[in-house]
Amino acid sequence: MVIKVLFTGPASRLTMKVNSCQTLSSTSSKFPPKISIPVKYIMPEYSMEWFPLSEINTQMKSRILGMIVLAATAILFAGCPYTSEVPITTAGMKLPLGLTGVWEDPDNPSEKIEIKATSDSNIEIIKTTSSEGSDPVIEDYLGFFSDVNGSIFLNLKENDEYSTSYYLYKIERQGDNKIKLLSVTPNIREKFTTSEELKKFFAANMQNSYFYESTETTYFKVK
């Protein structure tokens, strides 16, 4: 899922799409200056029309500020794992048995994920978040697994033509019907251009507690 932003100005017209863990920004004097919105929470695709500040009336200013606050609030609840332009390995590891199906986070029953096998080594994850009085929010991801010295990591990317980065998670099976997902911390500053370098870095650091976000998500299989 992406957020589509339509910039409208006196002399130019531009449509820009960004991935949900990237940053929206406008620095041109023709548009609201230096507005940056980190966007992680996946919302239904929508358009924002930005005009020169002198042409924005009070109602439109309120609408824009509301969208900015919504995006910023979403960051607080969702966060972003470490992202990489390369996966830890190429796809090839066989899917763990019993992983496909529908899983639920007991701390957040409005959220469910369905894991589908698209090949012997690739999966599609459809995450559905329901809320009373509105349509469910659906996120679609593609992924595969990597074995790093016996630890299993998930390489995950959004299922759209604009996504080039992988979100990286450690996954732990705890019996047949329970999995734990740990986000690799985004505080890692190193960037890698090859999977070989990335895998070596993970092998050297994955045992450290600071390598992961402090919060973890546990899913139970419900179907």
Image (cartoon, grey):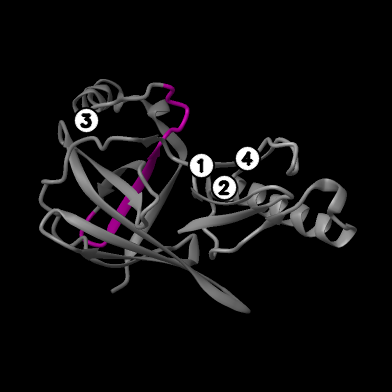
Residue 109 appears left or right of 155: right
Residue 59 in magenta stretch: no
Residue drawn at x 70%, y 47% as measured from the top left = 11
Report x, y in % for residue 159. Answer: 34, 57
C-alpha distance separating marks 3 and 2: 26 Å
Crowding at label 1, few (<14), some or many (≥20) Cα neighbours within 10 Å?
Answer: some
Quarter of the image containing the C terminus? bottom left
* Mark seen at residue 195: 3
**Residue designated by label 4:** 25
In what element is the residue under mark 1? loop
Do the numbered discs 1 and 2 sit on residues whose CB atoms are within 8 Å? Answer: yes
C-alpha distance separating marks 1 and 3: 21 Å
Magenta stretch, residue numbers: 175-189
* Amino acid under disc 2: Val
Residue 51 appears left or right of 181: right
Crowding at label 2, few (<14), some or many (≥20) Cα neighbours within 10 Å?
Answer: many
Farthest bottom residue? 133
Residue drawn at x 89%, y 58% as measured from the top left = 58
C-alpha distance separating marks 1 and 4: 10 Å
Crowding at label 4, few (<14), some or many (≥20) Cα neighbours within 10 Å?
Answer: few
Quarter of the image containing the N terminus? bottom left
* Amino acid under disc 1: Gln
23, above or below 103, in the image: above
**Residue designated by label 2:** 39
Report x, y in % for residue 31. Answer: 73, 44
The first of marks 3 and 4 along the sequence is: 4
Report x, y in % for residue 160. Answer: 37, 57
In what element is the residue under mark 3? helix
**Residue designated by label 1:** 22
Q: Given this view, does label 4 or label 2 mark the residue nearer the observer? A: 4
